[in-house]
Amino acid sequence: MDVPSGENAGLSSITLHSPPSPAPPSPAPAPPARPPAPLPPGPDAGPGVAVRAQPSPGYVGGRVVVTYTVRNGKNALATGLRLRLGLPAGIPVATLPAGCAGGVCALPDLAQGASSVLRVVLAPDRALRTNVTGTLTTTGTDADRGDNVSRIPLRILQPRIVSVPEVGKPGFVTSVRGKDFPPGVPVELTWKPGITATAPPARPIGDGSFIAQLLILVKDRTGPRTITASGPGFSPVTTDFLVVGGTITPPDEVGRR
C-alpha cells in the first residue's frame, strides 16, 4: 500500500557500529642476556734466582765475584721483583751493582724467558768459611717459589810459606814451601836484604801447594832476611830466614852443585 509521504516524516535513521577489534597482545619481554663466561686465569710467571762465586775458594788479598742470576720462566711477565743480597758480614765489599741499597736490589720486570744478572765484588781480608745467599721476592705471580732462595758455601784461604830449613850459609839452597795458593798462578820469590838469584816463578799445583828453591849467593851478606811470595790474586806473604857465616852448618844442608 502506498504510504503517504507525510507519514514518513517521523522516521529516523539508525547507524549500526561494529564492536572494536581487540588490541594485539604485548610481546613477551626478552630474557636477560647471559653474562659472558669468565676467561680462564692466565699462566703464572716463574722467576727464580741462582748464585755462584768465582773463584771458589777465594784468597786473602784477592777478589771474589759473586754473581746473582734472576731468570723468568716462559709463561708470563714477572713483575715487582726485589733481590735481597745475603753477603758475608766478615768480608769487605769492593763494588755493588747500581740500584742496590741496604742489601736489597730493585730489578726490572722480566719478560718470558728473560734474565737479569747482578755482580758483587768482595775483597776478602782474612781466612774464613761462610755462606752467600740470595732471596728473591715478587709482587706478581710465581708458579714455583721453591727456587726463590739460593745459597752456596764460600771459603777464603790465607796463603802461607815456610823455609826448610830457616837457616843457611852463603852458597846454600833453601827450600821454600807454599800452601793454600791459587793453583797455577805464578808465584815470585824474593828476599830482602840480599840478592835474589834469577829463577822461574813457582806454580802451585791443584791443591794450592808448591816447593821452590832459593839460592844464597856465595858473596851475599849474612844476617836475618825476609822471604816474600807475591803474585796475582792474593796478598804477598812472608817468612823469616837467617844467613849465617860459613863456620855454622845449617841442619839438613843442601850444598850447591
Image (cartoon, rainbow, N blue to C red):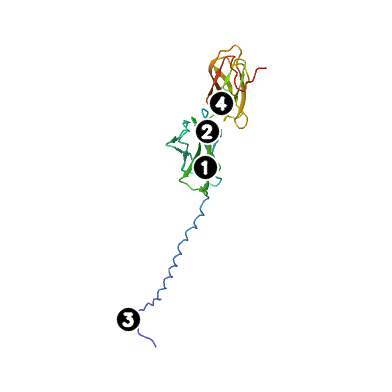
Residue 88 at what x, y percent from top left?
47, 36
Residue 46: percent from the left, percent from the top? 53, 46
Q: Amino acid at mark 3?
A: Ala
Query: Could you say whether the residue bearing mark 1 is in a helix, strand or loop?
Result: strand
Report how far apart the C-alphas of labels 4 and 1 lie in the structure. 36 Å
How far is disc 1 from disc 3 in space, using C-alphas? 122 Å
Q: Nearer the viewer, mark 4 or mark 3?
A: 4
- Quadrant of the drawing holding the C terminus: top right
Q: Residue beneath label 1, please? A: 150
Instruction: State the residue position of label 2.
Output: 156
Judging by the rendered image, the residue that carries numbered circle 4 is 161
Residue 241, quarter of picture? top right
First of labels 1, 3 by sequence position: 3
Residue with the most extreme top position: 219
Above or below for 140 versus 250: below
Q: x, y (%) of residue 229? A: 56, 23
Label 2 and label 1: CA atoms lie apart by: 20 Å
In the image shown, does 123 or 221 lie closer to the viewer? 221
- Looking at the image, the residue that sits furthest to the right is 257
Judged from the image, the secondary structure of the residue bearing numbered disc 3 is helix
* Cβ–Cβ under 8 Å for marks 1 and 3: no
Disc nearer the start of the sequence (3/2): 3
Name the N-terminal-most of marks 2 and 1.
Answer: 1
Disc 2 + disc 1, Cβ < 8 Å: no
From where the camera sits, is residue 69 visible?
Answer: no
Helix, strand or loop for disc 4: strand
Residue at the image point whose x is 32% and y is 81% from the top: 9
Residue 9: mark in rendering: 3
Q: Which mark is residue 137?
A: none
Q: Amino acid at mark 1?
A: Ser
